[in-house]
Image (cartoon, grey):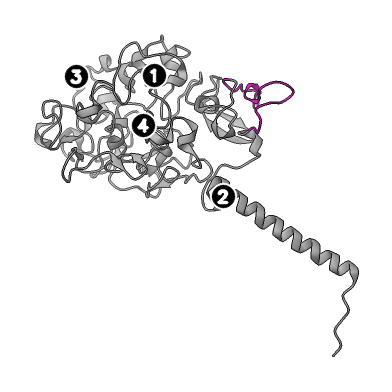
């Protein structure tokens, strides 16, 4: 059987298809080489036009791109910034506008500095500078350097582990506390990763949204907090809105025993400083270790806590007693004093169970609140025997206000 002669036009079409396939392969290889990831449809990665967040030369019509607004919201600073972004952490997440969630190129962006009536679950830096609330105060939050407002109350983290080079604010202090990186909370906390955006490289593009129960790298960790497990609210993003719509925080039945020698749990792990037991309280303990951990060999016994029975500070990562004032029967989840779960749930749980624990976030917000010490309520208004209160301390200590 004679072979069909291929026309010139058919040869041209096949050549174009081959060239296009090669071109796409090169582009794919370029993306993997530069960004180090392969897009995965199962992950809630950031999407949209690249120029929503990035700028190649930080210049447009003679002006820096960081000055250009996005949907009416101004970027902060002038740049240029690492990773070709158009702003730093607060430039995107702390624009200072009226809304707690803004739109940039069609994507929702949570705000940790805003003047909205309601706050996100993590709190609001605006209370520190007085843009919101009943007066500015450095005691109301974590005074990160991105705020350009040095802390006048504290030099070093309270409850810090005074051991070796950890003492006296050697690692984190009022001049270097930052949003992310070596001296911050989010991203890789390791000296060679720097601070800010470089420590978060690839995290937004590989973000695991919702249930974070692996936490073996930054994208799979709860809110990019390395090693922290939890469930990011799938309904009202970034918010503790109601008993049926809130984040789920991970806790354990026994707090970690921190030590600097032997087989004790410590904060140094794969990827840098991380939660020693995958919990949010354990993560807070990487700076405030003597508040939230048991003391192991090599630690300062006078500041730490030697045994569970001798807790002299409010315990965290300990199961609440299912009896008396703590009985869980008919108790609904109180977003003013959220509890932690000893396993990461598939979905939001609207009640309190017999296996739930107290976490740091049961009482404090991560960024800032309108009350001293980042508390979620006015501690001076917690009056034993006052009657009628169901929030604050009395959300767990249900009979103390009688």
Residue 335 is tagged as 4
Asked if 311 appears above or below 264 in the picture, the reply is above
- Where residue 84 sits in the image (x, y, percent)? 59, 33
At horizontal 40% and vertical 36% (from top left) the residue drawn is 192
**Res 143 label:** 1
Mark nearer the N terminus (3 vs 2): 2
Mark 4 closeness class: few <14, some 14–19, many ≥20 residues within 10 Å: many
Residue count near mark 3 (Cα–Cα under 10 Å), binned few <14, some 14–19, many ≥20: some
Local secondary structure at mark 1: loop
* Mark 1 / mark 4, whichever is N-terminal: 1
Tag nearer the camera, 1 or 4: 1
Crowd band around label 1 with a 10 angstrom C-alpha radius: few (<14), some (14–19), many (20+): many
**Highlighted range, magenta:** 55-77
Q: Nearer the viewer, mark 1 or mark 2?
A: 2
In the image, residue 169 lies in the stretch drawn in magenta? no
* CB contact under 8 Å: marks 2 and 4: no
Give the residue displayed 27% in from the left and 29% down from the top.
Answer: 395
Front: mark 3 or 1:
1
Which of the 4 image quarters holds residue 289? Answer: top left
Q: Residue furthest front?
A: 192
Residue at 47% from the left image edge and 37% from the top image edge:
200
Q: Disc 4 vs disc 3: which is toward the camera?
A: 4
Residue 97 visible to an observer of this rendering: yes
Residue identified by numbered label 2: 33
To which residue does mark 3 refer?
384
The span from disc 2 to disc 4 (Cα, nearest Å) is 43 Å
């Amino acid at each position: 059987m004679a072979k069909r002669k291929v026309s010139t036009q058919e040869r041209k079409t096949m050549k174009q298809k081959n060239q296009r396939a090669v071109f796409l392969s090169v582009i794919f290889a370029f993306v993997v080489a530069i960004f180090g990831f392969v897009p995965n449809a199962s992950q809630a990665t950031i999407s949209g036009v690249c120029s929503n967040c990035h700028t190649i030369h930080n210049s447009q019509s003679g002006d820096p791109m960081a000055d250009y607004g996005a949907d009416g919201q101004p970027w902060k600073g002038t740049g240029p910034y690492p990773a070709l972004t158009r702003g730093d952490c607060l430039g995107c997440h702390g624009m200072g506008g009226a809304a707690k969630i803004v739109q940039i190129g069609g994507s929702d962006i949570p705000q940790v500095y805003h003047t909205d009536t309601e706050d996100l679950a993590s709190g609001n830096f605006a209370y520190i500078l007085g843009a919101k609330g009943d007066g500015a105060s450095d005691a109301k939050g974590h005074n990160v350097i991105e705020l350009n407002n040095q802390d006048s109350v504290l030099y070093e983290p309270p409850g810090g582990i005074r051991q070796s080079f950890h003492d006296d604010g050697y690692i984190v202090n009022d001049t270097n506390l930052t949003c992310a990186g070596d001296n911050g909370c989010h991203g890789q906390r390791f000296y060679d990763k720097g601070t800010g955006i470089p420590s978060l490289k690839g995290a937004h593009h590989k973000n695991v949204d919702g249930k974070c129960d692996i936490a073996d790298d930054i994208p799979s960790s709860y809110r990019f907090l390395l090693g922290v497990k939890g469930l990011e609210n799938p309904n009202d993003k970034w918010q503790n809105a109601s008993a049926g719509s809130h984040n789920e925080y991970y806790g354990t039945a026994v707090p970690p025993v921190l030590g600097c020698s032997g087989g004790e749990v410590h904060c140094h792990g794969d990827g840098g400083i991380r939660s020693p037991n995958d919990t949010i309280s354990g993560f807070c303990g990487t700076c405030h270790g003597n508040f939230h951990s048991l003391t192991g060999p090599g630690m300062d016994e006078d500041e730490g806590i030697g045994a569970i029975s001798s807790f002299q500070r409010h315990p965290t990562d300990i199961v609440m007693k299912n009896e008396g004032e703590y009985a869980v029967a008919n108790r609904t989840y109180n977003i003013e004093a959220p509890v932690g779960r000893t396993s990461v749930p598939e979905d939001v749980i609207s009640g309190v169970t017999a296996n739930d624990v107290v976490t740091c976030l049961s009482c404090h917000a991560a960024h800032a609140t309108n009350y001293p010490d980042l508390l979620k309520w006015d501690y001076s208004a917690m009056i034993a025997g006052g009657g009628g209160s169901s929030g604050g301390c009395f959300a767990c200590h249900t009979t103390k206000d009688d």
